[in-house]
Image (cartoon, rainbow, N blue to C red):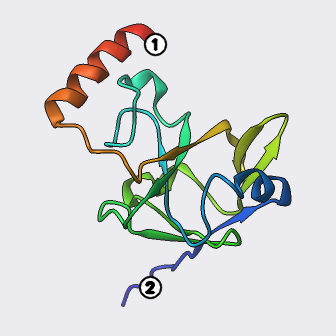
Amino acid sequence: MSYERILIMEANFKPAALDYLENKIPNNSVVILTTDDGSNKYSSIGATCALADKFQLIILNQPDDNFTIPIQNNANYHLTMADYEKYLVSDQLTVDFDHGTLTLKDKSGILDNALSVIDWRNVSPESEKDRLNKMVTLGDQIC
């Protein structure tokens, strides 16, 4: 018999982050934590040179079936992440607001010192072709 360790992911939003986010993310919002590296439909970066060094909080109208790992949090968000990205973070996730930016940390240290917040509640998803064209253009500009 095999026993798998069940890890409950948690994120602690520090008071400064909660104050900053109060007017940006409504209470009880559906939010995903994801990368901004070209690996998902919420990313605007089209190059692998940015792989896993940039994170974002995306506000949605409804849950996304690709982001199913729940992250318990003290911000009162319905926060999830993608299973294929959970290897990028470890225990003790924290979000803080310092020097004018949101910072995402875990027990290993700073993961992103410019965590962005993007509101996708009124955004129509791009077609795969449009997204690819945008990624190719941006990829030439950022790498």
Q: Taking 28 as reference, is 95 above or below it?
A: above
Quarter placement of the C terminus: top left
Q: Position of residue 33 (x, y in %)?
A: 51, 54
Amino acid type shown at disc 2: Tyr
Residue depicted at 38% across the width and 62% down the height: 67
The residue sitting at 51% across, 79% down in the picture is: 5
* Identity of the residue drawn at 45% across and 80% down: 4
- Which amino acid type is marked by label 1? Ile
Is residue 143 among the parts visible in the rendering? no
Residue 85 appears in view = yes
As measured in the structure, the alpha-carbon distance from the residue carrying label 1 to the one carrying label 2 is 44 Å
Q: Nearer the viewer, residue 122 or 140?
A: 122
Mark linked to residue 142: 1
* Residue at figure coordinates x 57%, y 72% from the top left: 28
Which secondary structure lies at badge 2? loop
- Which x, y percent locates residue 98? 84, 41
Q: Is residue 80 left or right of residue 109?
A: left
Tell me residue 124's x, y (percent).
Answer: 28, 45
Taking 18 as reference, is 85 left or right?
left
Query: Which of 100 and 54 lies nearest the eye of the viewer?
Result: 100
Q: Is residue 93 left or right of residue 4?
A: right
Asked if the residue under mark 2 is in contact with the one under mark 1, i.e. CB atoms within 8 Å, the reply is no
Q: Which residue is mark 2?
A: 3
Residue 24 locus on image (x, y percent): 63, 52
